[in-house]
Image: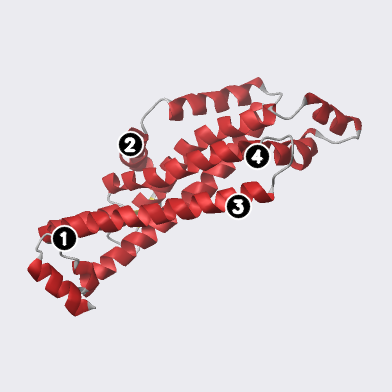
Amino acid sequence: MEDFFRQLAAEAPRWNFIFFYDERSWNRIVEGLYYTLILSVACVILSVVIGVVGAWAQGSPSRLLRNIVQGYIQFFRNTPPFVQLLFFYFALGQFTPTYSPDGWLQVPIISNVGWAIISLSFFAGAFNVEIFRAGIEAVPDSTREAAEALGFSRMQTYTEIVFPLAFRVSLPALNNNLVNLIKTTTQAFAIAVPELLYQCVTIWNDYPSAQYPTMLLLFVVYIGLVGILVFGMHKWERALRIPGYGV
């Protein structure tokens, strides 16, 4: 197989699949895919948690808490995610405590990978809050009233009755937002997170003839990641389907 790609590179210089026969380039691709998966999984999970907590806080009796959540939503929804990423890494990163593993080098406790996860999760989480809020509002008031009549606390009503129903309503919109989040993880390239796009760029900078193949690889990988997420979410929607609740 390696000989085939070497011969292809010799006969068609623009299609140099160097990562299939050069160990160093292959290791870059593997590392990039690893960080892409880390970013995607971590951001998806954290953004959903933020959405759930934020939607619950929006219904809080505390006006201060509701205003804080609303301010968070407006900030992250009305500014570009790329600008947010740079702000978190370059501005807030200046105030990050450091440690010295060797007594000389000062290393921030939050790496560029950590800042990418935090920034992108808060960005997607702002949209998830609104998605879950809309789902909660779709649950009939009579359902809440019945839970209260049975002696459920506000927290019990939310976690055991309202949110499970709201989650089903929210799944289609949540699916779209999480797909966009996975595609947005490529912006971590700007702060030198060694995800797949970053590694592909380093490869074609070293080997300009590998530009087309690396871009093709990047395209296929993201189609695969998004396809897996969409397939899983659609199966989840079907499994949780309740007649009358929109999924």
Q: CA distance from mark 2 to mark 1?
A: 27 Å
Rendered image quadrant of residue 76: top left
The residue lying toward the viewer, choosing from 188 and 245, is: 245
Classify mark 1: residues with Cα within 10 Å, few (<14), some (14-19) or many (20+): many
Rendered image quadrant of residue 128: top right
- For badge 1, the amino acid type reads Ala
Q: CA distance from mark 3 to mark 2?
A: 32 Å
- Image coordinates of residue 219 in percent, x first then y, are 31, 53
Comparing marks 1 and 4, which lies closer to the viewer? Answer: 4
Which numbered disc covers residue 210?
Answer: 1
Q: CA distance from mark 4 to mark 2?
A: 33 Å
The residue lying toward the viewer, choosing from 89 and 25, is: 25
First-in-chain label (2 vs 1): 2
Label 3: which residue? 235
**Residue 63 visible in the snapshot:** yes
Which numbered disc covers residue 247?
Answer: 4
Q: Regarding mark 1 in the picture, which secondary structure is present there?
A: helix
- On the rendered structure, is 151 left or right of 188? right
Which residue lies at the image location 65% right of the left edge and 36% below the top edge? 169
Classify mark 3: residues with Cα within 10 Å, few (<14), some (14-19) or many (20+): few
First-in-chain label (4 vs 3): 3
Comparing marks 4 and 2, which lies closer to the viewer? Answer: 4
Figure quadrant of the C terminus? top right
Which residue lies at the image location 29% right of the left edge and 64% below the top edge? 29
